[in-house]
Image: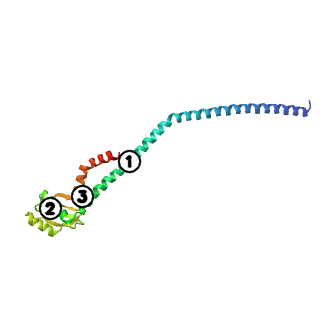
Amino acid sequence: MSLADIKAKISAEAGSQADAILAEGKKQSTAITRDADEQVRAIQNAWKERFTKEEPEVARRREIVARLDAAKVDLGVRQRIIGEAFDGALRQLTDLPRDRYLSFVRTLLERAGAGSEVVFVGKNERHIDAGWINEYNASHQTSLTLADERLPIAGGFVLRQGKIDVNCSWDMLVRDIRQDLEADAVKQLFAQGG
């Protein structure tokens, strides 16, 4: 056998082995691809099945969250309406005509048992002044004095005797009324609108 025949034989055997290796590789590649495709389909089917099972629950949760969000917005609006109503009441007290305003102040002073206290009024007080205090003192045999210091209140007054204050400011009156009436106002709003 010549060298050329040996080379040809080796080349033919190498080619046969390479073809066999390639064929085996293709076979394994096809098997791996088929297994991978089956795994992908199995995973996709599992996710589809899970989504199908969980879709109603996800939709139910979304609906609950949407209802809660709507309820929060509704509650915020109702609270704002109630706040605006009580703010309006405070403005109405502040804007009372002079005669009605002072009549109300007179009634509050009488009920507070005013005698010799210092009377503090708000920074923007237009009706209670030293002249009116003097008239009140004369008609009620009291000795009230008007304080030079003004308080950050919308209207009304604060009586001070030593360390004791009697707060008859419009702010305090509306706050007290609000605590008493707010629950009823909320019930009425929710009964009408909700």
Residue plotted at (22% across, 56% down)? 173
Q: Secondary structure at mark 3?
A: helix
Mark 3 vs mark 2, CA separation in Å: 17 Å
Would you place residue 24 above or below residue 148 in this image? above
Q: Which residue is mark 2?
A: 106
Residue plotted at (58% across, 33% down)? 45
In this picture, residue 33 sits left or right of residue 44: right
Mark 3 vs mark 1, CA separation in Å: 28 Å
Q: Quadrant of the N terminus?
A: top right
Q: Secondary structure at mark 2?
A: helix
In this picture, residue 177 sits left or right of residue 2: left
Look at the numbered discs 3 and 2 and tell me whether their residues touch, using CB distance below 8 Å: no
Q: Which mark is residue 164?
A: none
Q: Which residue is mark 1?
A: 72
Q: Amino acid at mark 1?
A: Lys
Residue 161 can be seen, yes or no: no
Quarter where residue 163 is shown: bottom left
